[in-house]
Amino acid sequence: MSSLGDVFRVLARMRDAGIVLDYAIGGATAVLFYAEPTRTYDLDVFAILPTGPMESLAPLTGVYEWAQREGFALESEHVIVHGVPVQILPAHSALVTDAVRAARVHDYEGVPVRVVGPEHLVALALQAGGARRRERAWQLLQSGAVDRIKLRVLLSAHSIDAEIPADV
Amino acid sequence: MSESRRTNVDALHNQKREWHQAQARLPLKEKVRILLELQAQDLPLIARHRRLRSWERPWPISP
């Protein structure tokens, strides 16, 4: 049986092959690295593509073609990697691009994996809005993994209007 | 709210916060194991309320 480490290896291979310039895991899977487990059924991966998202009508064509050559099926907007639905999301904003560039490299069972940092995860969740994402931001804040000064600088730099209570 | 009731409520909140923080400190592999378990437990319940998307299924991997 494949492991999550095998899935992470595929992401590294995709970058090494130049299909994406850089990537970082985001969403609920990224939260796992810093806070308590939360339910998710797909793995979000932010990617900086060789062609900017605005320069092509189908920016993920290269990713999908590479995945199929590698033997991975496509289903809806997901690449199925060892049975795990992976959604590649082109870096569509300055905050996402910044999150990918500043990602932390974690070691998962001997496999290096790029993961969005906790401050960027909170900023992304607050920018996107919605109850589920707000809850995710609060979980991260409660975990103690977030540098609140760094977070405030990030929120201000990207004009995200959000109150961060001191007691969360 | 009486003083003793407030103390109890505060204690409950503290316990809850400590539980969440303990969960956050678990080894990563253990958190992935919990995630896989949550997927297996929750999907049948979700399926009772709505049609699952084609890709919504427990990940067939080990942590």
Image: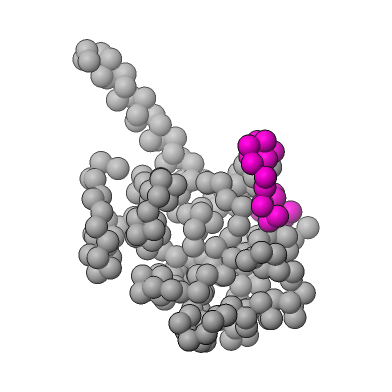
Q: Give the number of marks.
A: 0
Q: Is residue A163 above or below residue B1?
A: below
Magenta-span inclusion, residue B42 = yes
Magenta-span inclusion, residue B44 = yes
Q: Is residue B19 left or right of residue A76?
A: left
Question: Which segment is the magenta one?
Answer: B41-63
Q: Nearer the viewer, residue A150 or A46?
A: A46
Question: What kind of secondary structure does the magenta stretch mostly adopt?
Answer: loop
Residue A33 placement (x, y as % from top left): 49, 56
Q: Nearer the viewer, residue A144 or A74?
A: A74
Q: Quadrant of the N terminus of chain A?
A: bottom right
Please tell me which residue is depicted at 67% across the width and 68% down the height of the picture: A79
Residue B26 placement (x, y as % from top left): 52, 46
Q: Nearer the viewer, residue A126 or A150?
A: A126
Displayed quadrant of residue A34: bottom left
Displayed quadrant of residue A166: top left
Decide if residue A103 is in sight here: yes
Q: Quadrant of the C terminus of chain A?
A: top left
Decide if residue A122 is in sight here: no
Please tell me which residue is depicted at 70% across the width and 50% down the height of the picture: B57
Residue A35 placement (x, y as % from top left): 45, 49
Residue A51 placement (x, y as % from top left): 51, 87
Q: Is residue A69 left or right of residue A42?
A: right
Q: Is residue A123 above or below residue A95?
A: above
Please tell me which residue is depicted at 52% across the width and 70% down the height of the picture: A89
Q: Is residue A71 above or below residue B4?
A: below
Instruction: Give the colour scheme of this rendering.
Output: one colour
Please tell me which residue is depicted at 69% across the width and 81% down the height of the picture: A65
Q: Is residue A11 above or below residue A143?
A: below
